[in-house]
Image (tube, rainbow, N blue to C red):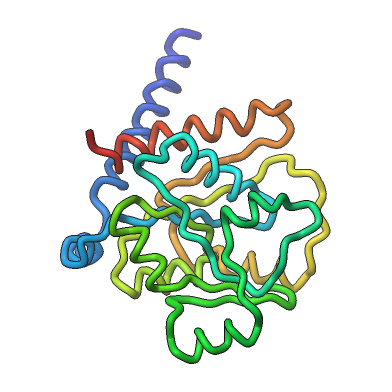
Amino acid sequence: MHGTIFWVRRESCLFRLFSYMLNLSFMGKEALVAEKKENLHPLVAFTGETGAGKTRHMKELVLRHADHFQVVPSITTRGKKPTESLEDFSFFYHQLSFEEFEVEKKEKKFIETDEYGESWYGTHAEILKQVLRSKIGVIALTPKGINAVKAAEIRVITIRIIAVGKPFIEIPMERKLSDISQYFLVKPDLTIHNNFTDDGLGFKRSFRYLELILIPSLVRA
């Protein structure tokens, strides 16, 4: 009896794994046509609530598989946070003054922009394409941002990170409501549960799961 239950669970996991890989391998026809036309690699977009672990998964993916993946830095008007290292800030962001950001925005150089707090964030079209011409891009976006990039005929693989047992983080109510409302704007290609309560093993498990699904689907020998 126990052996039968184990086998059913195992078969279920294998079926889910196969389904995810099949889904990633055969994305929307229009996006694939655009990718070939522009000669661009796909973009892996991480999305999820504040503090879910998006940037940690992104950095690990790029550092472990640097031959194939590269971060697409977001353009922002905010400076480095006190809890943020200069290395990490420079890894994920390019900083502009508010005035410089406004000029770029008026000249329509961004595919998408978003405001959080008193800071602006944007995905610069030319920087994005520069990355995608040589490697698979990796970026963190809101669902609204993901839809904007898809509208630009770029193939997007959406990874949603869900935090489990996350330590309390003070998040403005406006941002919480925004996260909830945008949650339904995009259907993820893959959902990852990042367990914060598992003595550090939760991230290792969630990242390994990400590798098992993503690498075979996107990286070809």
Residue 1 in view: no
Q: Quadrant of residue 203?
A: top right
Identify whether 93 is placed above or below 13: below
Q: Nearer the viewer, residue 20 or 53?
A: 53
Image point (51%, 66%), residue name: 143
Residue 129 in view: yes
Q: Quadrant of residue 43?
A: bottom left
Q: Position of residue 99 (x, y in %)?
A: 63, 87
Image point (17%, 64%), residue name: 33
Image point (68%, 41%), residue name: 164
Q: Nearer the viewer, residue 112 or 144?
A: 112
Q: Quadrant of residue 3?
A: top left
Identify whether 220 is placed above or below 134: above
The mark total stands at: 0
Q: Position of residue 53 (x, y in %)?
A: 63, 46
Q: Position of residue 56 (x, y in %)?
A: 60, 44
Q: Residue furthest bottom?
A: 106
Quadrant of the drawing holding the C terminus: top left
Identify whether 35 is placed above or below 4: below
Image point (30%, 43%), residue name: 218
